[in-house]
Amino acid sequence: MRVFVAGATGVLGRASIPAMITAGHDVVAASRSEVNDATIKEMGAAPAQTDLFDPASIARAASGCEAICHLATKIPPLMKIRSARSWDENNRIRREGTKNLVAAGISAGAKVFVAESITFIYGDRGDAWVDESATTSSAWGPALDSTLDLEREARRFAESGDDRRAVILRFGLFYGPQAASTRDSARMARRRMLPVLGKGDNYFSNIHVDDAGRAVAAALDAAGGVYNVVEDEPVTQREYADAFSSAIGAPRAIGVPRWLGRLFIGGPANYVFASTRVSNRKFKEATGWSPQYPNVRQGFNQVAEKLDGGDL
């Protein structure tokens, strides 16, 4: 299958393209610089000069492709997530960029549209297991509005023809040695600046970036629909922090009151406080995919090996 990938040089794109090529797909990847061209070629894909906000350039790059993978994001660094303006580009990518990619896919005659979404849109579900039938909401933060818009656009692709399908992947919280958020967290944890907010008994659903990349490749052959892509074993916020600190040899994270966390983080604190114990059963049964790292304890050990090896 010939696949066009937006977001090729991002964290998820770098994990997904090698997995697609290993699966036998021919990948064309969006690029905006010579540096990105080189990175894309190293992964075994063909770069195409593309601006996600220029419909004509996307249409040219996606011509002849049978599948479109929308993996483009612009998530602000941890120290800037409090600022609503820092999410503007990500929101534009999810709205305008998705619309342009859907149009290009329809024009190219593509049959599959794979879109990157997130499990945060489930909100707070307490200790209950959450599957794809659960209702979604943007009430937990303005940045989630654009995520729901992305999902609606992906569905529009599927509705444009009987032989077209949209595969929406709701990912858990990414981590891995290639993720800037993980590297930032490691530096903060070693300085005892990465706290547990509140009681820390709320569930986090996570996914190692390598497993997420393999999921994107598997999604190309999946039936249309919405799928959760998370580890087998969600953990509480306290368990997450303890496993991370233990793996990298950092001091145990201190607990701070919820109000203090909200003061420093702002609106995104809603994501940290929410409890989402998400099930991956549907995607596993549909594709045969299974996470190499079923929980963060095993995943963080791999992260720690990379840290010790000087890769971070």
Image (cartoon, helix red, strand yellow):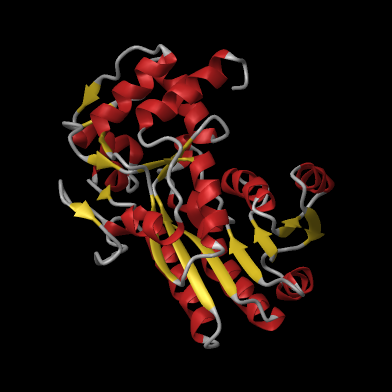
Is 65 positioned to the left or the right of 72 in the image?
Answer: right
Quadrant assignment for the N terminus: bottom right
Looking at the image, residue 157 lies above or below residue 138 = below
Indicate the quadrant where residue 131 lies. Answer: bottom left
Residue 180 versus residue 208: which sits nearer the camera?
208
Residue 193 appearing in the image? no
Residue 26 versus residue 250: which sits nearer the camera?
26
Residue 58 versus residue 211: which sits nearer the camera?
211
Q: Position of residue 228 (x, y in %)?
A: 37, 56
Is 205 positioned to the left or the right of 176 in the image?
Answer: left
How many tags in the picture? 0
Indicate the quadrant where residue 102 lies. Answer: bottom right
Is 308 positioned to the left or the right of 266 in the image?
Answer: right
Q: Position of residue 9 (x, y in %)?
A: 67, 47
Residue that appears at 43% across and 16% down: 248
Looking at the image, residue 247 lies above or below residue 201 = above
Looking at the image, residue 154 lies above or below residue 282 = below
Q: Position of residue 6 (x, y in %)?
A: 65, 59
Residue that appears at 43% across and 30% down: 299
Quadrant assignment for the C terminus: top right
Is 266 positioned to the left or the right of 198 in the image?
Answer: right
Residue 88 appearing in the image? yes
Residue 110 versus residue 56: which sits nearer the camera?
110
Indicate the quadrant where residue 143 lies. Answer: bottom left
